[in-house]
Amino acid sequence: MNREELFENIKRKQSFLCVGLDTDVNKIPEFLFDRDGDDLDPIFEFNKNIIDATADLCVAYKPNVAFYESLGLQGWDVLERTVDYIRKNYPDQFIIADAKRGDIGNTSAMYARTFFGALDVDSVTVAPYMGEDSVSPFLTDDYKGKWVTLLALTSNKGAFDFQFMEDKESGERLFEKVLKTSLKWGNEDNMMYVVGATKAEMLSDIRKIIPNHFLLVPGIGAQGGSLAEVVKYGMNSQCGLLVNSSRAILYASNGEDYAKAARAEAQKVQQQMSGFLKNL
């Protein structure tokens, strides 16, 4: 999916919501399981019903790969079937594999083949710590229309361990160095950045460096980030935002009405977003 198609979906749906499919086998409703509790099909059933309930309210889905890998081969099978279900039934959705990969070049090339080839997602989250040669394999001509979602400023408390470290001479913070350096690797049509909603006040500084790129913004909902602040500091003329909510939507209910409750939560966010999009 290219940038124009993504923006058109945002305008058409009046939404820049990304639903995180961080499906935890220990949190989905118990009634979905068989008596033995070892049948993993309920995870796919849960995902399917969440997707069906929210697809008209969001523009993206972000399965967190760790929740599927933790279940071994069966979990990976559920991930593949989930992505395939979205592709076949909701082809306008932007799919981000939240995998946080990034390694030496030949290894990253295999990760790129995995997520862009075998799994066929639109984007994969990549850690920039190892530099350009760990990211460039995801940005080759073999994967036109695919995106890197680069970690820039994350929402966890550990972000303060490294990401805010300042260069003594320039005063430049490490996350700003990451942004400026990575501009040489990709462009606004194939690279977006992770910026946590709990660091929303930093978005104005980030927009000075990358005014036109899309930002994937986790941290609203259960993590307490403010959608209004994210929009205030981060929205640009083409929206430029994919705001993720996971737990608040997925686990809005643990009963048989879980899909209906998930839709209600997603609709609350979408209605807020619609108000912010009126002038675009």
Image: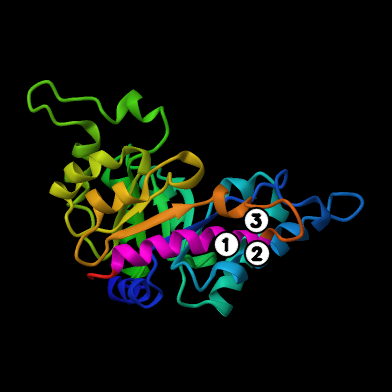
- Asked whether 220 or 44 is in front, the reply is 220
Label pair 3/2, CB-CB below 8 angstroms:
no
User: Along the line of sight, which residue is nearer the eye, 181 or 212?
Assistant: 212
- Residue 260 tag number: 2
Q: Nearer the viewer, mark 3 or mark 2?
A: 2
Q: Main secondary structure of the magenta part?
A: helix
| The quadrant where residue 277 appears | bottom left
Residue drawn where x is 85% and y is 49% of the image: 37
Q: Position of residue 219 (x, y in %)?
A: 43, 44
Q: Which residue bears the numbered disc 3?
A: 76
Residue type at mark 3? Trp
The residue indicated by pointer 1 is: 264
- Contact flag, marks 3 and 1 (Cβ < 8 Å): no
Left or right side of 55 for 102: left
Q: Which mark is first along the chain, 1 or 3?
A: 3
Q: CA separation, marks 3 and 1? A: 29 Å
Amino acid type, residue under disc 1 in the picture = Ala
**Residue 196 in view of the camera:** no
Q: Is residue 176 above or below residue 261?
A: above
Contact? badges 2 and 1 (CB < 8 Å): yes
Q: CA distance from mark 2 to mark 1?
A: 6 Å
Disc 1 on helix, strand or loop? helix
Q: How is the protein colored in the picture?
A: rainbow
Q: Quick check: is 263 in the magenta stretch?
A: yes
Instruction: Please report whichever mark, 3 or 2, sits nearer to the chain's N-terminal start.
Output: 3
Residue 216 vs residue 179, the one in the foreground: 216
SS of the residue under disc 2: helix
Measured as percent of width and height from the top left, residue 254 is found at 72, 51
Would you place residue 233 above or below residue 223 in this image? below
Can the viewer see residue 190?
yes
What span is in magenta? 259-277
Magenta segment includes 18: no
